Amino acid sequence: MGSLFRSEEMTLCQLFLQSEAAYACVSELGELGLVQFRDLNPDVNVFQRKFVNEVRRCDEMERKLRYLEKEIKKDGIPMLDTGESPEAPQPREMIDLEATFEKLENELREVNQNAEALKRNFLELTELKHILRKTQVFFDETVPTVSYNTYSSSSSSYNTATTFKSRWRYARRQMADNQNEDEQAQLLGEEGIRVSQPGQNLKLGFVAGVILRERLAAFERMLWRACRGNVFLRQAMIETPLEDPSNGDQVYKSVFIIFFQGDQLKTRVKKICEGFRATLYPCPEAPADRREMAMGVMTRIEDLNTVLGQTQDHRHRVLVAAAKNLKNWFVKVRKIKAIYHTLNLFNLDVTQKCLIAECWVPVLDMETIQLALRRGTERSGSSVPPILNRMQTFENPPTYNRTNKFTKAFQALIDAYGVASYREMNPAPYTIITFPFLFAVMFGDLGHGTIMALFGLWMIRKEKGLAAQKTTNEIWNIFFGGRYIIFLMGVFSMYTGLIYNDIFSKSLNIFGSHWQINYNKTTVLNNKHLQLNPNTTDYEGTPYPLGMDPIWQVATANKIIFHNSYKMKISIIFGVIHMIFGVSLSLHNHTYFKNRNALLYEFIPQLVFLVMMFFYLALLMFIKWNRYAASNKNPFDAACAPSILITFIDMVLGNTPKQVENCSPYMFAGQSFFQKLFRFIALCCIPVMLLGRPLKIIQERRQANRQNLTGATSDAEVGMTNGTAGGVAGHGGGGDPHEEEELSEIAIHQGIHTIEFVLGSVSHTASYLRLWALSLAHAQLAEVLWNMVLSIGLKQEGWPGGIMLTVVFAFWAVLTIGILVLMEGLSAFLHTLRLHWVEFQSKFYKGAGYAFQPFAFDQIIENGDAAAVEGAV
């Protein structure tokens, strides 16, 4: 827990590894996840580094694995995930892995190509089968239906179509006359068709094929316009969808047959078919030939179905075998790739036999890292032990806070604002309590808090199974990552809801009300707004044991007034305590870094300023609560209670409070003197914060310059006495290695910081009023939902009322969870986040550091991409 309050102490180390043992040692460090390597070759191109070929081999293996994964997911085969992480293979095992992946990829590609060729052949045969069936219907018709009516109605087009129709009828009559001589005569005859003009022989030809259904209308229009109506088109839809062999999509097609006369039209029709990507198939003219071809097509289709089934079975067996090891293969390849990425950060010594690395490591884990290096050396069989030396550096080390699954989410909230500077106080452990509590002040409802707590508890109980799913849904990942925060926010909301005595806008009468009110029916009906007056005999005079009296839920007239006064005051009290606590934490930073100037001229005046002004404001609230009561028997009557806001404003401005008749403007004896004293002390703190640190720095620099001059003079005299000139060079230079900041910049920075703190103290105190505002809004929304939704169902009677109540309750539950729990919860969460980032952390937290990013296999495997590999090293 020490590193949770302040980041781990880090050190920069230099690591010497023998070339043969470097791979195994880096593998052990990756499993450990406690070392952050630095790039010692920043000016070297990525493609010119030593192990670039190995990285490329890993990229190629990853490509093959992704191809296998894509094919496995396409077939819906589950991949075995044992949750175990195999060790990184030895370099010599890369050859075996490459051979295995190459064999699987080639085999799978060959199977896919064969399957695609078989599917393409199957598609062609299926289309030919439909053509033979559909065209038989076309040839059996005595008079075809001409589709020229859907096109141009001009006289020329009509006459052309009519002429073509008459020729078709003549050909059909000739075919009918010769049918008794030969049933299998060709449609157009061997010698052609004799048309109505004597002495003219004309032969009708036809083509048949299939086309996509969505292209058919445009295809038909193009045929009519290009052939000027001298073609006859018949089409029929294929009812069942066909599978596209290239991508596996289901497509719908139609069969068509086109009759024409002459070779010129035949060429034109084929070009149009080619343009519309229609597939043409041979179709015999004789019925016997068509039947014979159809039987052959059906036989070939059955054979193809058998071959396709065997091909799919073989493909399935290959993918099932690969699915069992795919996850482990991915882990192994990514570990190998990460190791070689890390080795590319190292330098080679002059002998080319030793690799030199620099890395940040936690001081407490030095021994653990040494043991890991020894294990790696033993695995590699090297006889030269690795050397790990600590280095002196003026660089700022990375910030490393150890976390577990509980504290990780709270640390993420802090790091989202800014990573803590090295060894700076960490707000995360205090946020574990303050964050859910301030959230609960705004979200205080026993019912809504119970829903949130149960949701968080469910995610905690099922965290292993839910974490294993590894979904890409970002919203779910946010909820699951903050499951402990959600659970604590729900528990604290249950507590504050109990204090508010508020559950779904209603109260729990646990101890009985301390108000004894007896109203008759007439009084209740004649008074729309009833209010509670504690200055009567109706109030017993003792407060409710826990939280608020349940009677306040029915006091419609002054319920909000009472709740506003209470919640507004506790918001200011919590805010002042929170800010003072933040300033107090800066003391630990100043004492740890031995910053005496900041301690004297920043921390002390800031704390005094807050106490003298705003803690005194909170103290007045407690005094008012204890001194003034509603009963007239009390010497401090509530009617004479002064306004705390007016009192505070008069104190700041130095005004004399107005005297009210028979009432004292002060709450306690000597209040005027103490207020003047507090104001004077607070005003004196401002110039101390503004000028104290710059003047002290000027004084320290002048003293340092005098000492340097005195030291230089004495060294020069010693050098002259000894007859050497090296005395001056031997002394004169020590000091801060960083450049000194200009005094003007220090003064400007201090002025801005002082103004920001003084004005920010006022605005930050007012900012905590959001605790009161959101609490009031949440309670009013819950009451609106109850009165305008659920109460409608509760007022119904009989069995229709039960049905009505069920429907209304479902609607009310959806609105409650969607609006009051989710939306209001998110709003309260964001406001709580702002109170911590701005009002609390600005008092002590700089957040100017950078995170410790160790080389860890767990993080690389969890992210599962190449960017994670490069980012981790």
Image (tube, helix red, strand yellow):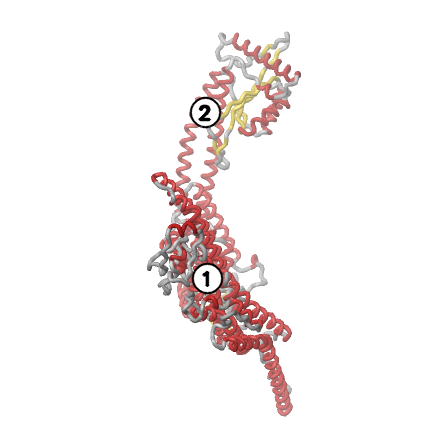
Nearer the camera: disc 2 or disc 1 = 1
Residue 352 visible in this rendered orientation of the protein: no
Q: Considering depth in this image, is 657 or 580 the residue closer to the camera? A: 657
Residue type beneath disc 2? Val
> What residue sits 40% from the left and 31% below the top?
306
> What residue is disc 1 on?
567
Residue 368 lies left or right of residue 251; in this view the side is left
**Image height of 267 relative to 514, above or below:** above
> What residue is disc 2 on?
297
Extreme residue in the left direction: 511
Quarter of image, res 3: bottom left
Point out residue 522 in the picture as x, y percentages from the top left corner: 39, 50
How many dots with numbers?
2
Extreme residue in the bottom direction: 721
Point out residue 220 in the picture as x, y percentages from the top left corner: 58, 24
Separation of residues labelled 2 and 1 (CA atoms)? 86 Å
Ranked by sequence position, the earlier of labels 2 and 1 is 2
> What residue sits 61% from the left and 16% below the top?
161
Badge 2 marks a residue whose secondary structure is helix
Residue type beneath disc 1? Lys
Badge 1 marks a residue whose secondary structure is helix
Point out residue 729 in the picture as x, y percentages from the top left corner: 62, 83
Point out residue 580 in the picture as x, y percentages from the top left corner: 48, 70
Quarter of image, res 403: bottom left
